[in-house]
Image (tube, grey):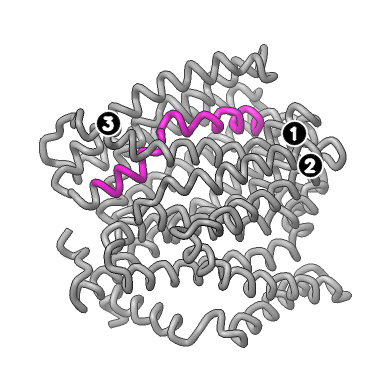
C-alpha cells in the first residue's frame, strides 16, 4: 500500500490518481449497471404488472429489514482495519466471514419464523424462502469482495456486478417471453446471486495470497465496533423500506406496485455516491488524523455529490411524466407524481453517504444511531398518518420528510458532529434552493416536457456557477487529477 501514502506531493498525486481511476472505473461500470438494471426493472414491471410487482417488492423489502443482523455492520469495520493492516487483511476478512456466517444462518431462520405473523403467509411465505437465501444466507460469500475496496481495485467488484446485472436482464427477458409465474422470478434471481458469489470468491483470492487464520480476540473487538453500525443499519433499513411493508399491509399491492415503480427509478442513482465514497473511504480512514487533507476530501465530497444530487432532482422532477411513460407504459401512469416527489429524497441520501463514511473513518460510528433512529421513527409515524389518507402519495412525502430530518437535523445538537453537518448544509441549502427555483420556473413554460427539462437544467447550471457553489478551482482540480491518471493526456 505504499502508493497510498498521504505524506508528500508525489504520494498525494499518486493517491489522487488512484482514487480518480478507481472512481472512474466504478462510475463507468455502475453506469452500465444502472442502464442494465433499469432495463431489467422495466421488463419486470411490464411483465408482472403492478399487483405482482407489489408482491415481489413487499417480500424483498421485508427481508431487507433483517439485513443488518446478517452482516452486523461488519463491512466498514473490516475495510477500515484491513486498510490499516494490509498484511493481516486475509485473516481480518476470514474472521469477518466466520462471524457473518453464524449471523446470517440465525437471521434467515428468524426472518422465516416471523413472516407469517406480519402478513406473509401461504404462497408468499414460500417465495420468501428464496429471497431470504439470496439476501441473508449468501452474505458471507460476498464479504471477500471488500478486499477490492481496500486495495482501490473496485473495478473487479464492479465488473462482477455488471455481469450479474446482464445475467439478471437475460433471465427476466426469458421469463417474460415464457410468461413464467412469479416463482421463477425468485428462482432466477437466486441463481444470479450464486453466480455472483462464486465469481467474488475466485477473484478475491489473488489479493489474499498469504496464510489466513481466525482472530478470536479481534472478533470480539470487531463486534463491539460494529454494534452501532449494525443498529443504525437496522434503523436505516426501517426508514428506507418500511414504507413498502406498510403499503403492503395498509393499502393494496396494486398501489404498492405503482409506488415501487417510482422508487426503482429514484434509487437507480444511489449507485453514484456509493461509487465515489467507496473509493475514497480507505483514504479517509488513513487521513483521519491529518485534518487539512481530511477536510479537503470531505469538502469536495460534499460539494460534488450535492451538486450532482440537486441536478438530478431538476432533471427527474421535470421529466417524471415522460420518464414513467417511456419506461413503464400507461399502466404505471400514477407513478409519475410519486417519482417527482421521491427524487428529492436523493439529496438526503447523497448527503448521508458522505456523513456515514466520514463518521466511520473518524471512529465516530456511535453517532450513526441518531439519524437512523430519528429517520425510522419519523417515517413510521408519518406513514401511519399519511398512507390511510393519501395512499402512495403519503408514503412518498413521508420518505422525503423523514430522510431530510434524519441527515439534516438530528446530528446538529452534538458538538462532535455539528461542524460536519453544518459544512454539508451550507452547500446543500443553496444548491437545493437553486434546483427548486429552476423546477418552478421551467414547469410554468408552455412547452413540451423535453424543453422544460432542458430549460430547468440550464437555469440550474447558470445558478450554481453564478453563486460559486462550484468554483474554477474545482474544475482545475478535477482536470489535474484526470491528467495525472491518464498517461496519454499527461
* Callout 1 crowding tier (Cα within 10 Å): few <14, some 14–19, many ≥20: many
Mark 1–mark 2 CB contact (< 8 Å)? yes
Mark nearer the viewer, 2 or 3: 3
Lower sequence index among marks 3 and 1: 3
In percent of width and height, residue 335 lies at: 77, 48
Quarter residue 204 falls in: top left
- Residue name at image x 19 percent, y 66 percent: 5
Left or right: 46, with 465 as reference point: right
Mark 2 / mark 3, whichever is N-terminal: 3
- Which is more foreground, mark 3 or mark 1? 3
Q: Secondary structure at mark 2?
A: helix
Point out which mark residue 444 bears: none
Main SS type for the magenta part?
Answer: helix
Instruction: Indicate the quadrant where residue 13 lies.
Output: bottom left
Residue that mark 1 sits on: 247
Quadrant for residue 409, please give it. Answer: bottom right
Residue 438 in sight here? yes
Vertical placement of residue 386 versus 433, above or below: above
* Residue behind mark 2: 392
The range drawn in magenta is 56-81
Residue 384 location (% of width, % of height): 77, 35
Report if residue 222 lies within the magenta region. Answer: no
Helix, strand or loop at label 3? It is: helix
What is the CA distance from the residue labelled 3 to the residue labelled 1? Answer: 39 Å
Residue, disc 3: 220
Most foreground residue, 477 or 424: 424
Quadrant where the N terminus is found in the figure: bottom left
**Is residue 2 toward the left or the right of residue 436 in the image?**
left
* Residue 350 in view (yes/no): no
Is tag 1's residue or tag 2's residue first in the polypeptide sequence? 1
Amino acid at each position: 500500500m505504499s502508493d497510498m501514502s498521504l505524506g508528500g506531493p508525489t504520494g498525494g498525486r499518486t493517491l489522487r490518481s488512484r482514487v480518480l481511476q478507481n472512481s472512474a472505473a466504478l462510475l463507468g461500470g455502475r453506469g452500465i449497471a444502472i442502464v442494465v438494471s433499469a432495463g431489467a426493472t422495466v421488463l419486470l414491471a411490464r411483465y408482472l404488472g403492478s399487483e405482482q410487482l407489489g408482491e415481489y417488492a413487499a417480500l424483498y423489502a421485508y427481508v431487507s429489514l433483517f439485513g443488518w443482523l446478517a452482516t452486523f455492520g461488519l463491512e466498514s469495520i473490516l475495510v477500515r482495519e484491513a486498510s490499516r493492516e494490509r498484511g493481516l487483511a486475509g485473516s481480518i476478512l476470514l474472521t469477518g466471514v466466520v462471524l457473518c456466517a453464524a449471523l446470517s444462518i440465525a437471521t434467515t431462520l428468524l426472518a422465516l419464523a416471523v413472516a407469517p405473523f406480519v402478513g406473509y403467509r401461504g404462497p408468499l411465505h414460500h417465495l420468501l424462502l428464496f429471497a431470504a437465501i439470496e439476501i441473508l444466507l449468501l452474505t458471507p460469500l460476498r464479504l471477500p469482495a471488500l478486499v477490492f475496496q481496500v486495495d482501490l481495485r473496485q473495478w473487479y467488484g464492479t465488473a462482477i456486478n455488471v455481469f450479474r446485472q446482464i445475467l439478471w436482464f437475460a433471465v427476466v427477458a426469458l421469463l417474460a417471453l415464457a410468461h413464467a409465474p412469479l416463482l421463477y422470478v425468485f428462482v432466477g434471481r437466486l441463481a444470479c446471486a450464486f453466480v455472483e458469489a462464486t465469481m467474488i470468491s475466485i477473484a478475491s483470492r489473488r489479493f489474499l495470497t498469504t496464510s489466513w487464520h481466525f482472530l478470536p480476540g479481534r472478533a470480539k473487538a470487531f463486534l463491539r465496533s460494529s454494534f452501532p453500525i449494525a443498529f443504525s443499519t437496522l434503523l436505516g433499513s426501517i426508514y428506507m423500506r418500511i414504507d413498502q411493508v406498510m403499503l403492503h399491509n395498509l393499502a393494496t399491492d396494486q398501489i404498492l406496485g405503482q409506488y415501487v415503480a417510482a422508487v426503482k427509478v429514484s434509487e437507480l442513482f444511489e449507485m453514484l455516491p456509493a461509487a465515489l465514497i467507496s473509493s475514497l473511504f480507505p483514504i479517509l480512514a488513513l487521513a483521519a488524523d491529518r485534518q487539512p487533507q481530511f477536510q479537503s476530501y470531505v469538502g469536495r465530497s460534499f460539494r460534488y455529490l450535492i451538486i450532482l444530487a440537486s441536478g438530478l432532482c431538476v432533471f427527474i422532477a421535470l421529466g417524471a411524466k415522460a420518464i414513467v411513460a417511456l419506461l413503464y407504459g400507461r399502466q404505471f401512469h400514477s407513478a409519475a407524481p410519486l417519482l417527482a416527489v421521491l427524487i428529492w429524497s436523493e439529496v438526503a441520501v447523497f448527503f448521508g453517504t458522505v456523513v456515514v463514511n466520514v463518521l466511520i473513518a473518524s471512529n465516530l460510528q456511535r453517532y450513526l444511531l441518531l439519524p437512523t433512529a430519528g429517520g425510522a421513527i419519523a417515517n413510521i409515524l408519518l406513514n401511519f398518518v399519511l398512507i390511510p389518507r393519501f395512499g402512495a402519495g403519503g408514503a412518498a412525502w413521508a420518505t422525503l420528510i423523514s430522510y431530510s430530518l434524519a441527515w439534516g437535523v438530528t446530528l446538529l445538537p452534538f458538538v462532535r458532529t455539528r461542524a460536519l453537518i453544518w459544512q454539508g448544509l451550507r452547500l446543500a441549502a443553496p444548491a437545493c434552493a437553486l434546483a427548486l427555483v429552476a423546477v418552478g420556473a421551467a414547469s410554468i413554460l408552455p412547452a413540451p416536457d423535453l424543453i422544460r427539462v432542458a430549460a430547468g437544467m440550464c437555469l440550474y447550471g447558470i445558478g450554481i456557477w453564478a453563486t460559486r457553489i462550484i468554483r474554477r478551482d474545482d474544475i482545475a482540480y478535477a482536470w489535474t487529477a484526470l491528467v495525472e491518471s491518464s498517461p496519454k493526456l499527461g
